[in-house]
Amino acid sequence: MRYTKWFASLALAAGMAVMGTTAASAQDWRDNRHDYNRVDRLRDTIARDRARLAADMRRGDRWAVSRDRAALERHETELRVMLRETRRDWRDGNFERGSYNSYRDNRR
């Protein structure tokens, strides 16, 4: 009877630990998925900006060209920042779980 109680306690503790780890990794995956969706929307915006800039250049509208160049530059800068943050989040999440496997990782 005494061993059954200990076994049940250990099994319960192990189950709770596994569930917590799974929930945390699922949350990280959802956060990264949301970031990548934002990156995709921003890439679509940049494509529209480039098409608008090309159309304004064909028409010769200097004011619209300068406005479109500024918007394109702003969106490209925002995309670079978002990609850098997303890569950092992905790397941080993998380092925390200990599943990062790379030749550059000399900490093991």
Image (cartoon, helix red, strand yellow):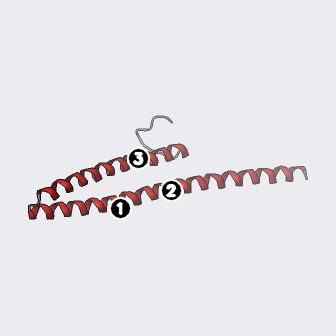
Real-space CA distance between mark 2 and mark 3, rounded to the nearest whole angstrom: 15 Å
Q: Which residue is mark 2?
A: 29
User: Looking at the image, which residue is at 76% across and 54% down?
Assistant: 12
**Mark 2 surroundings within 10 Å by alpha-carbon count, few (fewer than 14), some (14 through 19), many (20 or more):** some
Real-space CA distance between mark 1 and mark 3, rounded to the nearest whole angstrom: 16 Å
Q: Secondary structure at mark 3?
A: helix
In terms of sequence position, does the residue under pointer 1 or pointer 3 come before the other? 1
Residue 85 - label: 3
Q: Amino acid at mark 2?
A: Trp
Q: In the figure, 59 relative to 77: above or below?
A: below
Would residue 31 be found to the left or right of residue 44 on screen? right
Q: Amino acid at mark 1?
A: Arg
Residue 41 - label: 1
Q: State how many labels appear.
A: 3
User: Looking at the image, which residue is at 56% across and 53% down?
Assistant: 25
Would residue 76 be found to the left or right of residue 17 on screen? left
**Residue 4: percent from the left, percent from the top?**
86, 53
**Residue 100: percent from the left, percent from the top?**
48, 45
